[in-house]
Amino acid sequence: ETGVTQTPRHLVMGMTNKKSLKCEQHLGHNAMYWYKQSAKKPLELMFVYNFKEQTENNSVPSRFSPECPNSSHLFLHLHTLQPEDSALYLCASSQAGTGVFRGGYGYTFGSGTRLTVV
Amino acid sequence: KQEVTQIPAALSVPEGENLVLNCSFTDSAIYNLQWFRQDPGKGLTSLLLIQSSQREQTSGRLNASLDKSSGRSTLYIAASQPGDSATYLCAMYSGGGADGLTFGKGTHLIIQP
């Protein structure tokens, strides 16, 4: 399998549930990301992992908890979510470069998990 | 803080037309800019990546340009087809403390058969 794979594709959970989203990349990239996409809003960066260490969380509520056990896998653990957390959650990966390619070689996104909180 | 604006927000044109999608950004200190397409309910598919040292990139019927000094990028689609219908997003990497991409809200494109 190639690219960035996210599971599950769809998830419906109650506000008291605990669930996890999974992301796996097969590209040998050294950074992984979680983004949230809500209707009528630009994609919002939630978490960044470079070399397995979290570098930014952009003030995301603590009910979202990321985990990056290795450079190929990324999880987003969810607990006591609110209905407004319903959105498309996208995982991405990238490879940092050097010199004129300091910005890297572009991002690859997964197909996303459509989360509905009821 | 980088802000990205995409104009128009929505566009509907007949099949076969050439069209231009616009993206503007407030901070010209970017490392690269990437155009994506997103089909309804799906993830993002990368179309073109332009490094800050480049002025344009081409792939098939798509051509993207970058003018850092004016803070603008355009995506040109030649001979549009119904299969081009999607939302087109531009995003840029500015480095510094923000390691992720900054996105615009996108242009929703419909190509009429």
Image: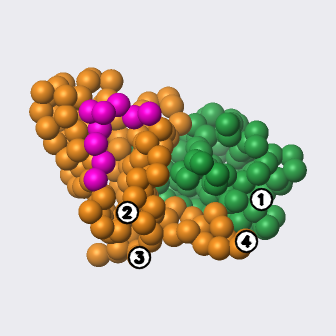
Discs 3, 4 touching: Cβ within 8 Å = no
Q: Nearer the viewer, residue B102 or B76?
A: B102
A24 lies above or below B107: below
Of the two numbered discs 1 and 4 in the rendering, the one whose residue sits closer to the viewer: 4
- Can you give x and y, in whole percent of width and height, for residue A115 in the image? 26, 38
Q: Which mark is residue B57?
A: none
Question: Label 1 amino acid?
Answer: Ser
Q: Secondary structure at mark 2?
A: loop
How many numbered callouts?
4
Q: Which mark is residue A100?
A: 4
B96 lies above or below B13: below
Q: Secondary structure at mark 4?
A: helix
In the rendered structure, does residue B30 fall within the stretch colored magenta? no
Are the residues flagged by discs 1 and 2 from a single subunit? no
- Which of the two discs, 3 and 4, labels the residue nearer the N terminus? 3
Q: Secondary structure at mark 1?
A: strand
Q: Gap in Å between the C-alphas at discs 3 and 4? A: 21 Å
Q: Which mark is residue A28?
A: 3
Q: Gap in Å between the C-alphas at discs 1 and 4? A: 17 Å
Query: Can you tell which quarter of the image residue A116 is in?
Result: top left
Name the residue carrying label 2. A52
